[in-house]
């Protein structure tokens, strides 16, 4: 299902990290913007109960019981409310970017109520943002924004306008990831895979899945690489790129609760960033974000 697994990945890693027997094995994965394995994006009954058990500080509460017909489960108001609460606690993010497509949330709620195994196949937002900032220079991103602002189209958001006019910055990257992941899952589950996703990605997915030469399609494992900053770019330029992207998409991705290191694109090791430098990065980001936000608002309010 096309749902971002970022928040659930964070909770799973946090639980494993707090467990002494798993601490060392998960420590290096805490800040990774992509799944370290398919188990991190799989949502089944046992994981639902395990996460809920930790949230309730050891109080056992089984959200889903394996009983009742399909009709009885879907008409069970108490069960539906519990599934919705679980989604709000562990799937939708608690930070600024608190969003889940209503139709996808409805489908996910029904799937959980029925006790189905669900893979969250959306490209993690942090991974998408880092790939966009790696693929395009600051000048290119500024140029895209300038073109969009000159169009004067105020019917939809700047972020959606850029995603449509320059799909390689958004839809293409997400499609490559999801298509490769779904193909990988299809090899395991064969004919038992039901795919639920948003319309803009459907045509692309059908073309990829039905490709006559599947060996030429991206390999899922090859896509799971941490984007590395270009040596020619300064820290200030990278910070400005992420400030621009946040302003464009109306988010503050680096303030999400599941973000362990807000400057992972500068240095993967959070502990290696001096406190003084981190403060300067914070000020630089705030200044650049404010400037782009005001530029966009000024253009749209003309």
Image (cartoon, rainbow, N blue to C red):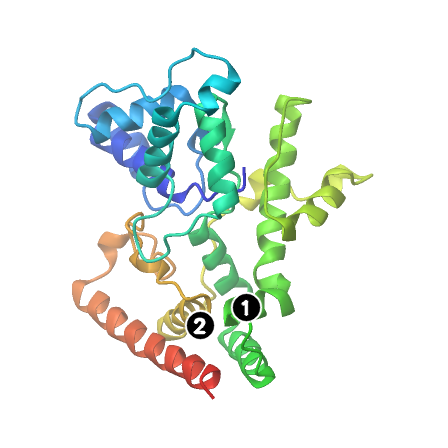
In the rendered image of this protein, does residue 135 appear above or below residue 26? Answer: below
Q: Is residue 204 above or below residue 79?
A: below
Q: In this view, which residue lies farthest toward the right? A: 212
Relative image position of residue 74 (x, y in whole percent): 47, 24
Spatial CA distance of label 1 from label 2 is 11 Å
Q: Is residue 212 left or right of residue 273?
A: right
Coordinates of residue 152 in the picture (x, y in percent):
57, 83
Asked which quadrant contains residue 150, the reply is: bottom right
Q: Earlier in the sequence, mark 1 or mark 2?
A: 1
Q: Position of residue 288 (x, y in %)?
A: 35, 78
Task: Determine the secondary structure under disc 2.
Answer: loop
Q: Is residue 274 left or right of residue 177?
A: left
Classify residue 25 by image quadrant: top left
Q: Picture quarter containing residue 208?
A: top right
Residue corresponding to mark 1: 136
Q: Which residue is mark 2?
A: 233
Q: Residue at x 66, y 26 (%)?
A: 187
Pick the front one: 203 or 282: 203
137, above or below 124, in the image: below
Q: Residues within 10 Å of mark 2 (few under 14, many from 20)?
A: few
Q: Decide if residue 178 is on the left or right side of residue 215.
A: left
| Mark 1 residue element | loop
Residue in the picture at 22% in, 53% down: 271
Which of discs 1 and 2 lies nearer the camera? The answer is: 1
Residue 218 visible here: yes
Kindly indicate whether the residue at mark 2 contacts the one at mark 1 (C-beta within 8 angstroms). no
Q: Residue at x 39, y 45 (%)?
A: 32
Q: Nearer the viewer, residue 63 or 25?
A: 63
């Amino acid at each position: 299902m096309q749902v971002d697994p970022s928040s659930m990945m964070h909770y799973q890693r946090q639980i494993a990290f707090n467990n002494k027997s798993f601490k060392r094995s998960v420590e290096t994965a805490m800040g990774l913007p992509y799944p370290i394995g398919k188990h991190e994006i799989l949502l089944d009954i046992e994981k639902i109960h395990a996460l809920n058990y930790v949230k309730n500080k050891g109080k056992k509460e089984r959200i889903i019981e394996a009983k009742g017909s399909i009709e009885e489960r879907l008409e069970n108001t108490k069960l539906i409310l519990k599934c919705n609460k679980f989604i709000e606690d562990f799937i939708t993010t608690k930070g600024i970017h608190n969003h889940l497509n209503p139709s996808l949330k409805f489908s996910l709620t029904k799937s959980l109520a029925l006790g189905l195994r669900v893979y969250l196949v959306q490209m993690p937002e942090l991974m998408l943002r880092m790939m966009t900032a790696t693929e395009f220079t600051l000048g290119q991103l500024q140029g895209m924004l300038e073109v969009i602002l000159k169009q004067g189209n105020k019917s939809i958001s700047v972020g959606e306008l850029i995603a449509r006019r320059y799909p390689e910055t958004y839809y293409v990257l997400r499609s490559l990831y999801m298509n490769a992941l779904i193909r990988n899952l299809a090899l395991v589950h064969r004919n038992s895979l039901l795919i639920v996703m948003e319309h803009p990605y459907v045509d692309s997915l059908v073309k990829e899945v039905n490709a006559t030469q599947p060996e030429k399609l991206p390999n899922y494992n090859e896509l799971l690489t941490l984007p590395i900053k270009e040596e020619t770019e300064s820290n200030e330029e990278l910070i400005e790129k992420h400030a621009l992207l946040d302003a464009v998409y109306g988010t503050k991705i680096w303030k999400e609760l599941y973000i362990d290191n807000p400057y992972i694109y500068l240095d993967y090791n959070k502990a290696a960033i001096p406190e003084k430098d981190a403060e300067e990065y914070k000020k630089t980001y705030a200044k650049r974000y404010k400037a782009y936000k005001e530029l966009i608002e000024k253009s749209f309010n003309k």
